[in-house]
Image (tube, rainbow, N blue to C red):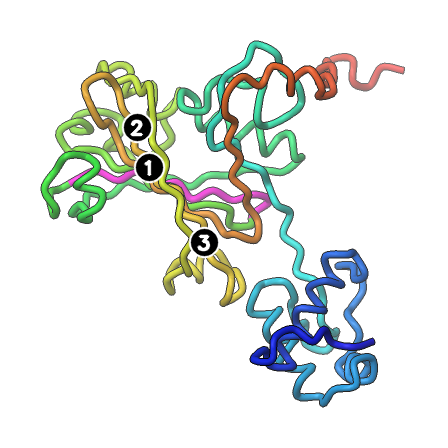
Amino acid sequence: MTIPRGTAQSPKYQRLAADLRRRIAEGEFTAQAALPVESELERQYGVARNTVRLAVDVLVNEGRLVRLQGKGTYLREHPVLDHRAYGPALRSAPRDPLVGMRDCLALPSAVYRGEAAEAGRELTVDFEMMIVRARGDIAERLGLRAGEAIVVRRQLRLLDREPYSIEESHYRAGLAAGTPLMEPDQIEGGDESVLAALGRTEIGAVDHLVARMPGPEEAQWFQGGPGVPLVVQTRVTYDRRGPVRVIETRYSADRSRLVYGVGDLAARAAQLPAPAAPVDPARADAP
């Protein structure tokens, strides 16, 4: 087995890491069995032990591998969940997170619950409420001055107790004052129901997507590899009067994938399998 040549400037350990990525992608290694020990990789590639160790370090930092003391090095598998960040609502209901649900702008919490249920995973959410000074970018998007007081409602989402996303909804203090938005609890019907009661029903949104490395607190919460970036989705929602709120959601890039549907997806829906019939609990044990 040889290491691909790559570019002249590419160090040997980086080329070895690239080949190990290829082997992982092709399914040569599984999460149930340890990777070959360093001495075996040294023999396979004909390189020094330090080169192997540096290459494995690269993949550990990327969150692809994990070293278990006394057991070996294993694939670090995070199931990737598709999140329907936006897509037109359809009447049909196929088993696909992109379609068959009400518009995710109207019922975002229901979208997360549906996606988790479809993947057979348990979704739990912790809520917090804070009154803070608005960052410059948040203030600009809400039409405020930087440093003005705003209300932030934070949701910490976990899937099967593994950190999944941090979502922060930013509201003008005057809009949230005297409403359930000031409480650090989940609101029946979602924040959207409070906004609708205030006459601020969201009818449109603009998303900004960036990738960046996590800060120390984010890295500690997500528990990812030190080289795993975050995908940050900043959504500004609007009604006919102007901006309503800014929603900033951070996802770990190794366990989330944002899906956007554009245009008429009826043809796509027609190609998907029909949803399974619901099970009647009263008949679940019937022969």
Q: Residues within 10 Å of mark 1 (few under 14, many from 20)?
A: many
**Label 2 sits on residue:** 237
Q: Label 1 is placed on what type of residue?
A: Ile
Query: Is 243 above or below relative to 80?
Result: above
Can you see residue 281?
A: no
Q: Quadrant of residue 220?
A: bottom left
Instruction: Find residue 245 and report its horizontal and vertical position in percent.
Output: 26, 31
Classify residue 189 as left or right of residue 130.
Answer: right
Q: Mark 1 or mark 3, which has the lower sequence index?
A: 3
Query: Which of the pair 38/221 is nearer the observer?
Result: 38
Instruction: Locate residue 283 relative to residue 153 in the image: left or right.
Output: right
Identify residue for label 1. 247
Query: In terms of secondary structure, where does tag 1 sit?
Result: strand
Which residue is denoted by mark 3 in the rendering?
Answer: 230
**What residue type is disc 3 on?**
Leu
Identify the residue at image location x=37%, y=62%: 215
Residue 48 vs residue 100, the one in the foreground: 48
Upstream in the sequence, badge 2 or badge 3?
A: 3
Element at label 2: strand
Q: Residue at x 49, y 67 (%)?
A: 226
